[in-house]
Amino acid sequence: MSTKIAVIIGSTRQGRHTDKLATWVANTLKKSVDVELLDLRDYPIPFLDEAISPRFNPHRTPDTITQKWLDKIIEFDGFVFVTPEYNRSTSAVLKNAIDVIGHEIDDKPVALVAHGVSGGAQAIANLRMALPGVGAITIPQAVYFTDRLADSFEDNGDLKKEIAERPYGPQSSLETQLDSLLWYANALSAART
């Protein structure tokens, strides 16, 4: 069975650029595993208002859209969450998509890729605090994208050559991170079975 990874676009804003970053991640992953790009625009999850935390409610009956999201994410062996940094944190839509999770990503690895003035460092820090709460394991490496997204990519979603070929630049950082993600995905998949 092949390893299956989801790349999640963590922004739904009009005029967003996070999708460009997510496409680059997915294109890089496609070289070695099954990958699916998940757009939170396709999952307009209502804000979590359940009386009992999803992790502690054995009789939970989520709304239809939330259930669609949960059914989808359970399919994967690992994840890459791609997020902008808004006001020193991740986007509300991504945080909500995490908050509605019960046990669907228990003991599964998550890689973090962010962009913003500081490369999305505070968004990644916030996600590192939130994800263990839903049973996920964040891998040690992260990609902090500081280049201007609107000017960094070719039409096919690949990084422009002058950026991709930088020593210790974003392409090499991403490849190192994804190697680690796949190692964790395979090791944790074997441990879960």
Image (cartoon, rainbow, N blue to C red):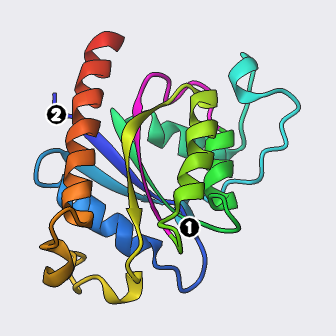
Is residue 72 toward the left or the right of residue 156 in the image? right
Residue at the location (74% across, 25% down)? 60
Above or below, 65 relative to 75: below
Would residue 116 be found to the left or right of residue 188 on screen?
right
**What amino acid type should be assigned to the residue bearing mark 2?**
Ser
Horizontal arrangement in the rendering, residue 179 relative to residue 76 (left or right): left
Q: Position of residue 33 (x, y in %)?
A: 17, 44
In percent of width and height, residue 188 lies at: 32, 20
Upstream in the sequence, badge 1 or badge 2? Answer: 2
Asked if residue 193 shows in the view, the reply is no
Q: Nearer the viewer, residue 116 or 192?
A: 116
- Residue at point 64% right, 62% down? 91
**Label disc, if present, on residue 2 of the rendered structure:** 2
- Classify mark 2: helix, strand or loop: loop
Q: Toward which corner of the image does residue 156 lie, by quadrant?
A: bottom left
Position of residue 145 measured from the top left corner of the image (x, y, whole percent): 39, 68
SS at circle 1: loop
Can residue 104 be found in the magenta stretch?
yes
Residue occupied by mark 1? 11
Residue in view at x 25 percent, y 76 percent: 157
Query: Residue 168: x and y, percent?
Result: 20, 62
Which residues are drawn in magenta? 101-115
Q: Amino acid at mark 1?
A: Ser
Q: Where's the N terminus, which quadrant?
A: top left
